[in-house]
Image (cartoon, grey):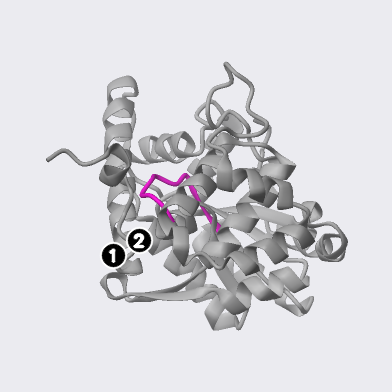
Amino acid sequence: MIEPHHALHTPDRAIPLAARLLRAAALNRAADMLALAGLRRRLASDAHTLGVALALQRIGSIRNQALATWLRKETRVTDAPADFLVVAARAATICTDLGIPYLIGGGVASTVHGEFRTTRDIDLVISLPKRADVQRLALALEAEFALHVPDVADAYRQTSDAAQDRAQRGSFSAYDRVTGYRLDVHVSGNTPFDMSQFDRSIPITIPEIGAMLMIASVEDTILTKLEWYAITPSDRQWDDVQTIVRVQDAALDLSYLDHWAIRLGVDELWKQAQTSQIPPHHHPGTPAHAATDAQQMKLDLGE
């Protein structure tokens, strides 16, 4: 018997969360292998140059020569598929060792709560209540990730603004020195919703990589994606919300979602997400995922 189309792609909620992450990592490695096959045909280059090209292709910046030059200098990537879980574990270990609250959201959380898909980067949300944490975090990250150290202090300085306007949240980007995988770090404004996210984050132990990751809850993943969609409409964000709602269905805490959607000013979007399959800001003829969120691309380097 042929199953409905959505049944072929929607993971059973009974699948352990760690298993979902491992499947997503395998999907990402397969995508990297396909991308590398194409790059090898086009580029007669050494392993490091191919690795940098792959890192740029993941984030849609293949023509960014300034970033390419910087990554060639600051990383030791090779032409091998990356495991984003290992990169996420490196970042999580740094935060845990420093006592810095963190959670992982974005595409990784979408995979946990919705359908398996590739993810171009890792979204790390952190709380930096003390200024002394800024330098400690910057130094610890710099050992494992290529970044512009002053960007960490710049993101921290936006904390007070973010407490009043969540659209002003500070962020910075860092690149894993081994794989070139991008880490987008978002510094929370320590608002009631931010604190709720940290309190409700889900610990997922992954024995295969010897790590535990704190992942945003399903409801907070939906709300955050609606927030990003309100700031910069993107079909990818909207598709993720639709998929999570469909997969989780009756398991969602609707009272929590309704409460915070109103407080965050995304209640109309939340209502539409429950009833509409078409992004409210979608324009016919616009390619899916064409919008780019500038706050998630903080490290520009002249692209």
Q: Is residue 117 magenta?
A: yes
**Any mark on residue 255, and which?**
none
Badge 2: residue crowd in 10 Å (few <14, some 14–19, many ≥20): many
In this rendering, is residue 181 above or below 14? Answer: above
In this rendering, is residue 226 above or below 59? Answer: below
**Any mark on residue 15, and which?**
1
The residue lying toward the viewer, choosing from 273 and 21, is 273
In this rendering, is residue 132 above or below 5? Answer: below
Q: Residue at x 71, y 66 (%)?
A: 259
In this rendering, is residue 138 above or below 170? Answer: below
Residues in magenta, as a range: 114-123
Q: Residue at x 57, y 63 (%)?
A: 219
**Residue 167: image location, x then y, percent:** 78, 51
- Give the residue type at disc 2: Leu
Q: Residue at x 31, y 24 (%)?
A: 44
Determine whether, in the image, residue 190 is placed left or right of residue 123: right
Secondary structure beneath dot 1 equals loop
Which quadrant of the view contains residue 48?
top left
**Residue 288: image location, x then y, percent:** 52, 28
The residue lying toward the viewer, choosing from 195 and 37, is 195
Q: Is residue 303 magenta?
A: no
Which quadrant of the view contains residue 14?
bottom left
Q: Disc 1 and disc 2: Cα gap in Å?
A: 10 Å
**Any mark on residue 21, and which?**
2
Q: Main secondary structure of the magenta part?
A: loop
Nearest-to-viewer mark from 1 and 2: 1
- Give the residue type at disc 1: Ile
